[in-house]
Amino acid sequence: MRSEITVRIAREIDARKESAKLSLHYDQQPDAVALDVNGASLLKVSWTVPDLAQDFLCIASCIYATDKAIDRELEDDKWTRDIAIEIPVEHEAAWSAVAERLSNCIGFLTGDLWEITFRHGEKRLVQKRPRVRRFRRQVPTGRAVCLFSGGLDSFIGAVDWLADNPNDQLLLVGHFDRDVAGPGADQRGLHDICALHFPNRMKLAQTQVGLSSGGVDNNFRSRSLLFMALGCYFAEILDPVCPVLIPENGPIALNFPLTPSRRGSCSTRTVHPQFVDEINAILRQVGIGNPITNPYELRTKGEMVDQCRAPRVLTAAFAASRSCAKANRRRYWANRTARGCGVCIPCLFRRASLHHSAQDTEIYGNRVENIPSLEEMPSDVLALISFLRSQPTDREIASGLLANGRLPFAKLPEYVSLIKRMRAEILTWLRSAGSPYIQNEVRAC
């Protein structure tokens, strides 16, 4: 069933949020679904508004909102959606020239079929309200932009950059959504800790983007696109070639399919090299020259922790970060006061990464130490143990990687080595911290 969506712009603006009022209109929803974009928070960071990157942010916001609004459960396979969307932009010709390429790229990201088209918009996304501002007009500074999610990887990315560039400033870019509790506060808390160790070296630009009413899909696969667009929004203001850093450990970015059933659309690709490379190529074709890079593409999470350029800062702050993919599903947790579930893939990788440095001391909703049997084993833990027990060869790892997305063939041996190091990292941790049942399962691995 195809969802035909038109993004409409209201005549009046949202004066409080200093943004155009955008809404999604489609047959399956009798009432329009309003976007929630806070332009005022963007203007607090910079009174200057970018040109092409503002279009990119509008596109990403509409795709993110649509991703949340369309229910996968209505599809025949309970997953793959067929979405056609028309998005208003200022530079219609430039974006129309990449429409098919962008549609395929977003399809790879979310696991859906997309047909994205463009029209010239009646208004731009950010709408400055004519008034005398009580605060000084801000001029952002920074030699780089770092996406700042509230997770451990993005914090390490910021800390490493600040340590390696002692005379330069960094602009941190955060996103939060009213439907997701935690990221906004996590980002602010980590920024405050970071500011104590690197005073006057960074600024946090946080923006709320989502739906004015709750969405039905909670996979948030398109959130990385929105993060990239926010990063490019500020990077274009700073410098035409200012880099946008999206720190993510290599195994999570590649998301190697732990079992055959996790290939294809069931595998997330939010920072997969194919997605990042394709977005960069599309942006270059449009005229946006700010490169998006993942500096940890070939490092495990444990290597990021062990090689952090400011280990004392990391030790002081890691507990304030959050890596959990299921932080809003606490009803399944034994300890509902914990910050992470403890048994999703990001939590498992986090614990393994902190184990080597004796920092795996946090409280979790559920713990691998308490899993007594196969019947009570969470699905992600089961998939991870299945992968460990399979003892894949280099050729099998390479095949799994290529089945999950396009990769440069010359770098394939490096990616294979990365997955092998990740496997050793997880195995070392489970042999030490797993329950007696789990330790027995991985004993011969």
Image: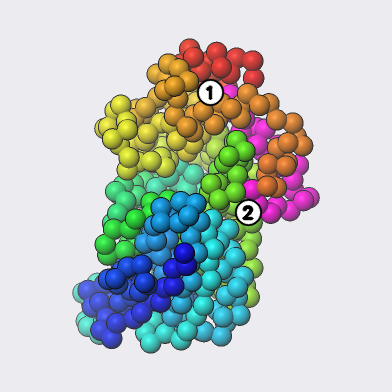
What whole-number distance in Å separates the C-alpha atoms at marks 2 and 1?
27 Å
Image mark for residue 273: 2
Horizontal and vertical percent position of residue 126: 35, 77
Kindly state the secondary structure of the residue where label 1 is placed: helix
Residue type at numbered disc 2: Pro
**125 sits left or right of 2 in the view:** left
The answer to which of 254 and 354 lies nearer the viewer is: 254
The answer to which of 245 and 201 lies nearer the viewer is: 245
405 falls in the magenta region: yes
Residue count near mark 2 (Cα–Cα under 10 Å), binned few <14, some 14–19, many ≥20: many
Residue count near mark 1 (Cα–Cα under 10 Å), binned few <14, some 14–19, many ≥20: many
Horizontal and vertical percent position of residue 59: 46, 72
Q: Which residue is mark 1?
A: 429
Residue type at numbered disc 1: Trp
**Earlier residue among tags 2 and 1:** 2
- The residue range painted magenta reads 404-427
